[in-house]
Amino acid sequence: MRKIQVQGVHHITLTGADRQTSIDFWEGVLGMPFIFDQPNLDDPDEGHLYFDPGDGRLITIFTNEKRSPDRRRTPTEPGCVHHLAFNMSHAVFSQVIERLEARGIGHSGVKDRGFMDSIYFKDPLGLLIELACYRFEPPVGCTHADVMIEAHRLRVARGDYNIQEVHLADAIEMLVERRQGSLSENRSARNPYA
């Protein structure tokens, strides 16, 4: 038996309401360019809109002009989507509350997640959206996942409850030392001011 190895998210498709609500939210609120539009090839009564969330991947929405937005929270039973999370820079994240409130959109306020900060709010159809901002940048040649797995190992070894910035900083130092050679025989921390 062998794994069926995936290499990233290709796209996520959501069931939307009418076409304009989708465009107004995904592009008009979240800034995702509307890049492709065609009929739903499995249902001729629906449209299929494509948006770029910023990494060249796709968020797609099935639309139908007979469906209206329903702001009640989407189901959270097993097998249902709890929320979608989107990455953003600190510069944008620092403006999120002001920009949501300018539209009258309720939100959670900033939530401290140790390795990132988050803000939650619902889309016009009741789907919970998370806007997330990492508290670190991975070293060149590494991914956020590389840093997270090392930070997790450090957290567990130290008996800490959740990942904090000290775990991230130590993980980054470890990854840099592992990935980048040095002419020094001793790469340990030193104090040249002593």
Image: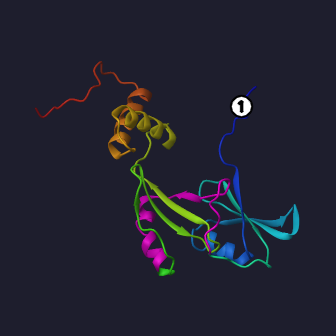
115 in magenta: no
Residue type, numbered disc 1: Lys
User: Is the N terminus in the top left, top right, bottom left or bottom right quadrant?
Assistant: top right
- Residue 181 seen in the figure: yes
Q: In the figure, is residue 106 to the left or right of 60?
A: left
Name the residue at the left extreme: 194
Question: What is the x, y in percent for residue 190?
Answer: 20, 29
Quadrant assignment, res 92: bottom left
Instruction: Give the residues in magenta.
Output: 72-101
Q: Is residue 95 magenta?
A: yes
Q: How is the image coloured?
A: rainbow
State left or right for residue 68 relative to residue 124. Answer: right
Describe residue 96's horizontal placement relative to residue 16 as left or right.
left
Q: Position of residue 134 (x, y in %)?
A: 44, 52
Mark 1, Cα crowd under 10 Å, few <14 / some 14-19 / many 20+, is few
In the picture shown, does residue 161 fall above or below 95? above
Label 1 residue SS? loop
| Residue that label 1 marks | 3
Give percent across and percent down for residue 103: 51, 80
Q: Nearer the viewer, residue 36 or 30?
A: 30
Q: Is residue 87 above or below residue 21?
A: above
Residue found 59% across the figure and 59% down from its top:
84
Which picture quadrant has residue 65?
bottom right
Residue at 49% in and 37% down = 146
Where the C terminus falls, by quadrant? top left
Query: For this view, does 108 lie left or right of residue 79?
Result: left
Is residue 143 visible from the viewing direction of this image?
no
